[in-house]
Image (cartoon, helix red, strand yellow):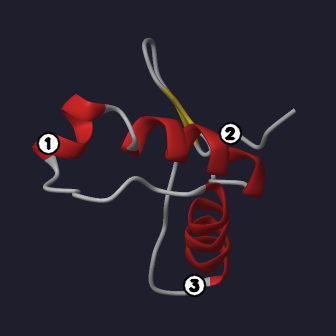
Amino acid sequence: MRDIFLEGEKVILTPMEEEDAEFIRKMENDPEVRYALFLYKPLTRESAEKQVREMISSHDIFMFM
């Protein structure tokens, strides 16, 4: 079970975990998302894992799922 940071009637926010890398990769590789975010190159699994690890270990970035 994931730790819940904030829970509302329609939303539950949990801290990002390393297991979220695959979700991030799939989301960023969706053509509509890439277009909207001006992302031109597909995100590899390795890059997604690295990004998530960096965000988790950062003291300046707080990411929630």
- Kindly identify which residue carries mark 3: 58
**Residue 59 screen position, x and y as percent:** 55, 87
Instruction: Name the amino acid type tagged 1.
Output: Tyr
Instruction: Name the amino acid type tagged 3.
Output: Ser
Q: CA distance from mark 2 to mark 1?
A: 31 Å
Residue 4 to residue 8: above or below: below
**The C terminus lies in which quarter of the figure?**
top right
Q: Helix or strand or loop: what does disc 2 sit on?
A: loop
Q: Is residue 10 left or right of residue 50?
A: left
**Residue 9 screen position, x and y as percent:** 45, 12
**Residue 18 shows up from this direction:** yes
Residue 38: quadrant of the picture: bottom left
| Residue at 23%, 57% in the rendered image | 39
Q: Residue furthest front?
A: 41
Residues at badges 3 and 2 in contact (C-beta under 8 Å)? no
Circle 3 Cα neighbour tier, 10 Å, few/some/many (<14 / 14–19 / ≥20) = few
**Residue 36 screen position, x and y as percent:** 12, 42
Instruction: Name the amino acid type tagged 2.
Output: Ile
- Kindly identify which residue carries mark 2: 4
**Residue 65 shows up from this direction:** no
Q: CA distance from mark 3 to mark 1?
A: 27 Å
Q: Of discs 2 and 1, which sits in the foreground?
A: 1
Residues at badges 2 and 1 in contact (C-beta under 8 Å)? no
| Residue at 26%, 33% in the rendered image | 31
The tag earlier along the polypeptide, 2 or 1, is 2
The tag earlier along the polypeptide, 3 or 1, is 1
- Kindly identify which residue carries mark 1: 35
| Residue at 43%, 36% in the rendered image | 27
**The N terminus lies in which quarter of the figure?**
top right
| Residue at 52%, 46% in the rendered image | 25
